[in-house]
């Protein structure tokens, strides 16, 4: 792991097109601004892991278990 020290308004660049800037520091919290192309996903770790778990669960579904997914049930239809 690369560890860098930055102060408010200082940035790091990842690759050629991702910029991470320290926006604010208050106590033990750091607020970061992230500039990245729209095709680059940016998530907090806990959100990324939840998405990954959901995708793994969905990949385990058998075709018959997916019938009706994404469609409102008859009681939800207008």
Image (cartoon, rainbow, N blue to C red):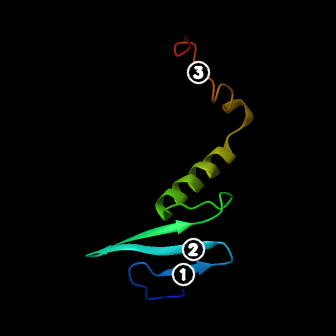
Residue at horizontal 52 percent and vertical 13 percent from the top? 75
Residue at the far left: name it: 27
How many residues crowd around disc 1 within 10 Å: few (fewer than 14), some, or many (20 or more)? some
Do the residues bearing badges 1 and 2 touch, measured as CB atoms within 8 Å?
yes
- Residue receiving disc 1: 12
Name the secondary structure under disc 2: strand
Q: Earlier in the sequence, mark 1 or mark 3?
A: 1
The residue tagged 3 is: 72
- Does 77 sit above or below residue 27? above
Query: What residue is rendered at 68% in x and 32% in y?
Result: 66
Q: Nearer the viewer, residue 2 or 11?
A: 11
Residue drawn 57% across the image and 13% down it: 74
61 lies left or right of 9: right
Q: Nearer the viewer, mark 2 or mark 3?
A: 2
Q: Marks 3 and 2: in contact by CB < 8 Å?
A: no
Would residue 63 be found to the left or right of residue 33 on screen?
right
Q: Position of residue 38 (x, y in %)?
A: 65, 57
Q: Disc 1 to disc 3, how far (Cα)? A: 45 Å
Determine whether the residue tagged by mark 3 lies in a helix, strand or loop. loop
Disc 1 vs disc 3: Cβ atoms closer than 8 Å? no
Q: Residues within 10 Å of mark 3 (few under 14, many from 20)?
A: few
Can you say whether 45 is above or below 15 in the image?
A: above
Q: Which disc, if any, is residue 4?
A: none
- Image coordinates of residue 11 in percent, x first then y, are 50, 80
x and y percent of residue 51 in the render?
A: 56, 53
| Count of marks placed on residues | 3
Which numbered disc, 2 or 3, marks the residue that appears first in the sequence? 2
**Residue on which the image places disc 2:** 19
Q: Label 1, secondary structure: give it.
A: strand
Question: In the rendered image, which quarter is residue 16 located in?
Answer: bottom right
């Amino acid at each position: 792991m690369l560890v860098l020290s930055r102060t408010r308004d200082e940035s790091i660049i990842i690759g050629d097109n991702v910029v991470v800037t320290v926006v604010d520091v208050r106590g033990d919290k750091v607020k970061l601004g992230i500039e990245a192309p729209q095709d680059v996903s940016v998530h907090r770790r806990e959100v990324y892991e939840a998405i990954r778990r959901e995708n793994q669960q969905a990949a385990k579904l058998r075709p018959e278990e997916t019938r009706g997914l994404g469609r409102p049930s008859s009681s939800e239809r207008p």
